[in-house]
Image (tube, rainbow, N blue to C red):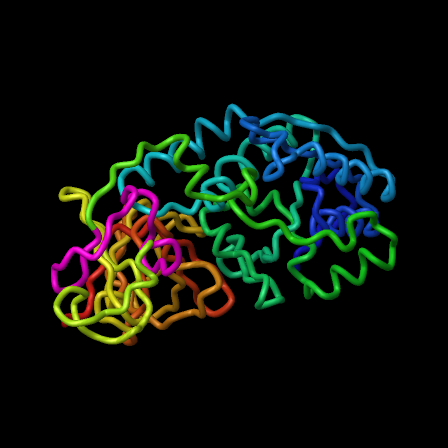
């Protein structure tokens, strides 16, 4: 389903991780001419403990040596800063919570990287994403499918890919379970077989996020209020919080007693609303508080894999990564955006995140969440 039909020149994005390494090996085993490219996309404090692309490149080069392929080091830092990071900061400054991995895939891995690979004479590119591509014989459209490993499926992050990008892309590990990928890596003696999976911001790495963001966005402290309108603390700046957040609120030790703490029990506090105009952070106690539940959302900046919106009706959606598909009804979807209604309320629907639609295993596309309707108290 995801395999090239003939031997081709395939350029693989080698990140230094095990998934892209096994991707390159599988393609070489299938007889393709494989070339590796390591993308450097972040230069600020790159020598720090959180983002050492040097070590990742050394790992990627070691993999290329074992597999027996060439590897090229390419710098896309300028493109990343202009197309991804600038938008990332704009969204956070506006009080929303963006997903940089989605933008990074659309603008860097499947645009800047794809363009570069084609200039190198590639017929296809390949990455270590857990997803699949299938050509629908009836519609003659390329479909983006979930990876076969439900615990690793990354189609959510790839939902902005278009027909041209999918037609030129292979996802070999999307056909495998992660345990199988690790087994292959050990069996063939890849030097990074036991390297842990990367997390954190795309290309920026794992780091104390608030400290990192504070370099680029000014802190504007203000009151933290509960659902009774009582001030129970002070926040450091609304950009540094996201809806549903439980840790790092600075009020975790509060015992809700009487009028001063809004009454109630010892349930944990969650971020429920952000009032950018009044600079107020609203928090509530309890995971199931109505302010954290939404039955309706609107999304903008829609992007559809097939090139046009799906027929309105009953579909499934994820409003954040690693969330189970939730049944929903999609209203008429003009090209710019759409509205989803959920029979069962969804938790902590967050403006700036993406609502991604599915029809079974087929990822249809999605959009950026603009607003939501909460349950009433």
**Residue stretch in magenta:** 224-249
Residue at the (59%, 62%) spot, across then down: 152
Instruction: Write down the quadrant of residue 262 in the picture.
Output: bottom left
**Nearer-the-camera pick, 253 or 50:** 253
Specify whether 176 is left or right of 69.
left
**Nearer-the-camera pick, 117 or 91:** 91
Say above or below: 80 vs 183: above
Locate the N terminus by quadrant: bottom right
Give the x, y percent position of residue 150: 57, 68
Specify whether 280 is left or right of 10.
left
Residue at the (80%, 63%) spot, across then down: 183
Instruction: Write down the quadrant of residue 46 in the picture.
Output: top right
| Residue 244 among magenta residues | yes
Say above or below: 90 vs 194: above
Instruction: Write down the quadrant of residue 147 in the picture.
Output: bottom right
Specify whether 321 is left or right of 329.
right
Specify whether 339 is left or right of 154.
left
Locate the C terminus by quadrant: bottom left
Give the x, y percent position of residue 349: 31, 60
Give the x, y percent position of residue 173: 68, 57
């Amino acid at each position: 389903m995801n395999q090239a039909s003939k031997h081709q020149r395939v350029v693989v994005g080698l990140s230094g991780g095990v998934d892209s390494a096994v991707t390159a090996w599988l393609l070489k085993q299938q007889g393709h001419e494989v070339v590796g490219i390591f993308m450097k996309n972040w230069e600020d404090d790159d020598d720090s403990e959180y983002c050492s692309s040097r070590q990742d490149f050394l790992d990627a080069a070691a993999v290329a040596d074992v597999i027996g392929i060439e590897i090229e080091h390419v710098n896309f830092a300028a493109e990343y800063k202009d197309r991804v990071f600038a938008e990332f900061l704009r969204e956070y400054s506006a009080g929303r919570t963006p997903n940089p991995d989605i933008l990074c895939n659309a603008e860097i891995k499947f645009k800047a990287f794809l363009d570069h690979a084609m200039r190198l004479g590639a017929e296809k590119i390949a990455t270590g994403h857990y997803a699949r591509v299938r050509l629908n014989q009836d519609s003659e459209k390329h479909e983006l499918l979930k990876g076969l490993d439900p615990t690793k499926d990354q189609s959510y992050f790839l939902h902005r890919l278009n027909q041209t990008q999918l037609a030129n892309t292979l996802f070999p590990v999307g056909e495998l379970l992660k345990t199988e990928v690790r087994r292959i890596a050990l069996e063939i003696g890849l030097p990074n077989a036991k390297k842990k999976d990367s997390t954190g911001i795309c290309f920026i790495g794992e780091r104390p996020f608030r400290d990192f963001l504070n370099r680029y966005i000014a802190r504007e402290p203000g009151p933290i209020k509960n659902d009774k309108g009582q001030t129970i603390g002070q926040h450091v700046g609304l950009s540094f919080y996201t809806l549903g957040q439980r840790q790092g609120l600075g009020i975790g030790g509060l015992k809700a007693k009487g009028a001063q703490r809004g009454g109630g029990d010892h349930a944990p506090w969650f971020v429920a609303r952000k009032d950018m105009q009044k600079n107020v952070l609203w928090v509530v106690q309890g995971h199931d508080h109505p302010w954290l539940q939404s039955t309706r959302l609107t999304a903008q900046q829609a992007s559809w894999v097939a090139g046009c919106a799906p027929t309105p009706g009953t579909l499934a959606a994820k409003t954040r990564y690693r969330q189970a598909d939730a049944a929903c009804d999609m209203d008429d979807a003009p090209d710019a955006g759409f509205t989803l209604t959920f029979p069962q309320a969804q938790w902590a629907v967050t403006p700036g995140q993406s609502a991604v639609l599915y029809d079974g295993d087929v990822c249809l596309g999605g959009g950026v969440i603009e607003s939501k309707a909460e349950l009433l108290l």
